[in-house]
Image (tube, rainbow, N blue to C red):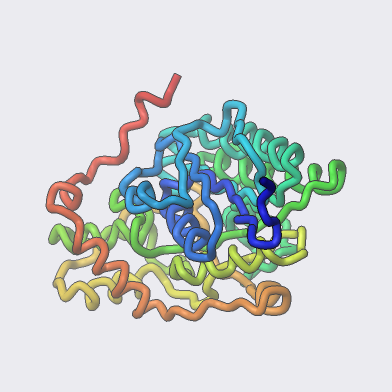
């Protein structure tokens, strides 16, 4: 007996790399909520299964423990690929520089090849770091950037710049449907407490009763986008018909010095702020021009910083004392060959 095709609705299948990471796990949640069958993939070098353990019982989710710098095989049809596998904090890429370069180059190559074979649309996670330490403010998508290719941060910046280049080459030469999102600083629940980025660092220090550490004079600026806004922008970009890079971030800019004061107020603590030398090539300004996202996607950041920070603080406060006191960075020994 043949099945009645009119009663059968095909479920779209999406592969999300870096699925156990901060952004990847939130993307898994969103696509499952939207009715997709989600295949998560992660080698857990910086990701953590606790970010997606709630999904393991879900009938529309499966997980592959796999390193995308090796050949990637996913059986069956695939409609979409989101490539979000990469170390994403400065400490990560100083400790695992070669793995950072490989996931942006070999990993991207493998996934573009998979997209080509499967006739899937692929969206790659690029970054505001492609702009380096920008000489243009705010940064628009047509700014080429100011990057030190051989500096300590170059391994991340250049991996992402190469990733954009090879993605466009697959689009123009092989006709692969590609999308490029340039992600600016994003925060929210599931960030790693000890990853070295400013939000988890400040909140962790405040919760442990330590002084807040600022690198440089604190006059450098950042703009922080709450994770639900970022995921919404990525979702819209994937389903658009625009193949060139799009900035997704929150243009609400603040100095790190003022941000430290906001954290002290939020946590109700009375720490003082201590100053240390600025790391090499640390960008002094970071603010997205999101005109393109507004025009093309009808997207703009909605969550205000005070609102998003309350939610993020509540998440960090819910961590166990062991997790809170674990100040040392992740151990990468098993991944360095």
The residue at the far top in this view is: 337
The residue at 51%/31% (across/down) is 67
**Residue 103, image x and y in percent?**
57, 36
Is 261 located above or below residue 274 in the figure?
below
**Residue nearest the viewer, comparing 313 with 20:** 20
Horizontal side of residue 261 vs 290, given as left or right: left
Quarter of the image holding residue 330?
Answer: top left
Give the quarter of the figure containing the C terminus. Answer: top left
The residue at 59%/50% (across/down) is 14
The image shows a total of numbered marks equal to 0
Horizontal side of residue 78 vs 263, given as left or right: right
**Residue nearest the viewer, comparing 263 with 227:** 227
**Residue 119, image x and y in percent?**
76, 45
Asked whether residue 4 appears in the rendered view, the answer is: yes
**Residue 133, image x and y in percent?**
58, 57
Is 234 located above or below residue 120 in the figure?
below
Is 174 located above or below residue 301 in the figure?
above
Quarter of the image holding residue 332?
Answer: top left
The residue at 31%/58% (across/down) is 200
């Amino acid at each position: 007996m043949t099945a009645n095709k009119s009663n059968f609705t095909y479920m779209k299948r999406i592969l999300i790399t870096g699925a156990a990471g901060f952004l990847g796990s939130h993307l898994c949640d969103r696509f499952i909520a939207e009715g997709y069958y989600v295949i998560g993939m992660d080698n857990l070098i910086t990701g953590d299964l606790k970010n997606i353990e709630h999904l393991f019982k879900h009938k529309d989710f499966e997980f592959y423990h796999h390193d995308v710098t090796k050949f990637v095989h996913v059986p069956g049809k695939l409609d979409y690929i989101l490539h979000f596998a990469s170390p994403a904090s400065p400490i990560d890429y100083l400790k695992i520089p070669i793995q950072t370069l490989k996931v942006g180059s070999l990993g991207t190559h493998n996934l573009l090849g998979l997209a080509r074979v499967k006739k899937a649309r692929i969206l790659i996670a690029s970054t505001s770091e492609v702009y380096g330490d920008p000489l243009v403010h705010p940064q628009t998508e047509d700014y080429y950037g100011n990057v030190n290719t051989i500096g300590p941060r170059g391994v991340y910046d250049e991996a992402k710049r190469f990733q954009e280049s090879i993605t466009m080459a697959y689009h123009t030469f092989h006709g692969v449907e590609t999308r490029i999102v340039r992600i600016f600083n994003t925060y929210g629940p599931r960030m790693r407490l000890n990853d070295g980025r400013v939000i988890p660092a400040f909140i962790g220090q405040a919760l442990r009763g330590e002084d807040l550490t600022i690198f440089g004079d604190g006059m450098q600026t950042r703009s922080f986008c709450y994770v639900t806004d970022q995921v919404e922008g990525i979702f819209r970009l994937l389903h658009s018909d625009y193949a060139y890079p799009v900035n997704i971030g929150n243009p609400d800019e603040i100095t790190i010095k003022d941000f430290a004061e906001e954290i002290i107020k939020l946590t109700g603590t009375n720490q003082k702020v201590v100053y240390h030398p600025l790391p090499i090539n640390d960008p002094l300004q970071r603010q997205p021009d999101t005109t393109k996202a507004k025009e093309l996607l009808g997207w703009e950041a909605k969550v205000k910083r005070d609102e998003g920070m309350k939610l993020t603080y509540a998440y960090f406060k819910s961590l166990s004392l062991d997790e809170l006191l674990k100040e040392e960075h992740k151990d990468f020994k098993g991944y360095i060959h």
